[in-house]
């Protein structure tokens, strides 16, 4: 005889209270911090798995710098100190730029949704991006690679590498 799966009352109550708390937190966005908005944007607005990971990482970096940050705190000084903090914690230049671009997207979305009116948050601040030198070869370096002596069994691989360079640029 099939019996229904027994559900304990305390489990139902706990589930109801947790969902009720989530709904209250979503409705009461006036108490949200910048980290909450960044996570919300990654999870609810964009919603892909990779965006959740990226925006959670951004929120983690903001939380490590200032737990109670809100949109009104954002200005050139705050962003400069945030970048210095990330640099002190060992983040590379391009990683800092990627985290910054996530924050910039959240602020742009918040402006569009009338959540904040801090449109001057990024005025005068320029995030530096490091040039990746392995992507930029000089003509001399390409000629050296082309003329480099290799064993006979590697000649085809060198030719394919040169062909890909000529085709892709």
Image (cartoon, rainbow, N blue to C red):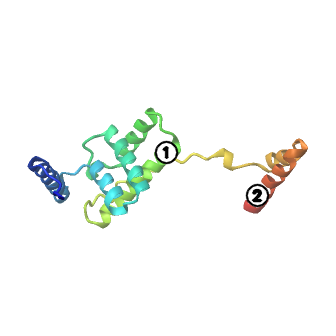
Instruction: List x then y, in percent, for residue 10.
Output: 10, 47
Q: Is residue 86 visible?
A: yes
Q: Residue 95's mark?
A: 1
User: In the rendered structure, which disc, 2 or 1, sits on the residue that comes first in sequence?
Assistant: 1
Q: Dot 1 lies on which element?
A: helix
Instruction: List x then y, in percent, for residue 133.
Output: 66, 45
In the picture, measured across the screen, residue 86 lies left or right of residue 143, that is left
Q: Residue 130's mark?
A: none
Q: Dot 2 lies on which element?
A: helix
Instruction: List x then y, in percent, for residue 103.
Output: 38, 52
Mark 2 or 1: in front is: 2
Q: Quadrant of the C terminus?
A: bottom right
In the picture, measured across the screen, residue 104 lies left or right of residue 168, that is left
Neighbours of disc 2 within 10 Å: few (<14), some (14-19), many (20+):
few
Identify which residue, 102 or 5, lies in the foreground.
5
Instruction: List x then y, in percent, for residue 46.
Output: 37, 62
Residue at figure coordinates x 14%, y 52% from the top left: 7
Name the residue tied to disc 2: 164
Image quadrant where residue 110 sits: bottom left
């Amino acid at each position: 005889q099939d019996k229904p799966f027994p559900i304990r009352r305390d489990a139902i109550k706990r589930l109801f209270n947790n969902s009720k708390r989530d709904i209250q937190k979503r409705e009461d966005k006036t108490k949200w911090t910048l980290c909450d908005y960044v996570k919300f944007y990654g999870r609810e607005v964009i919603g892909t798995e990779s965006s959740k990971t990226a925006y959670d990482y951004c929120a983690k970096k903001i939380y490590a710098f200032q737990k109670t940050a809100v949109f009104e705190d954002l200005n050139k000084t705050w962003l400069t100190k945030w970048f210095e903090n990330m640099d002190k914690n060992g983040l590379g230049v391009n990683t800092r730029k990627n985290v910054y671009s996530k924050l910039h997207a959240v602020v742009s979305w918040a402006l569009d949704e009338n959540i904040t009116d801090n449109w001057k948050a990024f005025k005068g601040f320029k995030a530096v991006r490091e040039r990746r030198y392995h992507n930029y070869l000089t003509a001399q370096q390409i000629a050296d690679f082309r003329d480099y002596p290799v064993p006979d069994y590697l000649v085809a691989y060198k030719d394919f590498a040169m062909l890909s360079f000529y085709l892709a640029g």
